[in-house]
Image: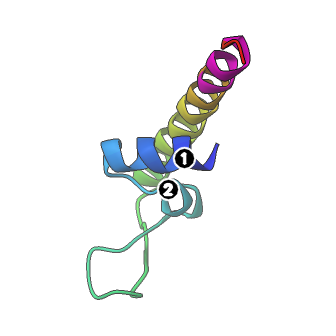
Amino acid sequence: MIFAVGFIQARKKFCLAYGLAGTFNFGKLGSITKVQSEQDKKADRKTAINIFAQSALLAGAITLVFFALPL
């Protein structure tokens, strides 16, 4: 699951944790800013949940492939 979350976050260039927390970081490392607009927070949270759902599906698919392989 960790691989899937990291992979999808990298592909979408969006941090799941920041999206759920309603924060962002476009400045100096460690400088976190809160998202001001409620509409933007809602969109970020929706994107974060979407990333989590896609990650769960990817992790499940990879797991099924490994279980289906004959050992």
Vertical relation: 34 (above or below) 68: below
Q: Residues within 10 Å of mark 2 (few under 14, many from 20)?
A: many
Task: Say what amino acid the circle numbered 2 marks.
Answer: Gly
Range of residues picked out in magenta: 62-68
The numbered mark at residue 37 is none
Residue 70 appears in the picture as rendered? yes
Which of the 4 image quadrants contains residue 1?
Answer: top right
Residue 43: x and y, percent?
44, 43
Residue at horizontal 67 percent and vertical 24 percent from the top: 60
Task: Say what amino acid the circle numbered 1 marks.
Answer: Phe
The numbered mark at residue 3 is 1
Q: Residue furthest left?
A: 27
Residue 45 appears in the picture as rendered? no
Vertical relation: 37 (above or below) 46: below
Vertical relation: 2 (above or below) 65: below
Vertical relation: 23 (above or below) 14: below
In the image shown, does 9 or 70 lie closer to the viewer? 70
Asked which secondary structure carries label 1, the reply is helix
What residue is pinned by disc 2? Answer: 19
63 magenta-colored: yes
In the image shown, does 29 or 25 lie closer to the viewer? 29
Separation of disc 1 and disc 2 at Cα?
18 Å
Q: Main secondary structure of the magenta part?
A: helix
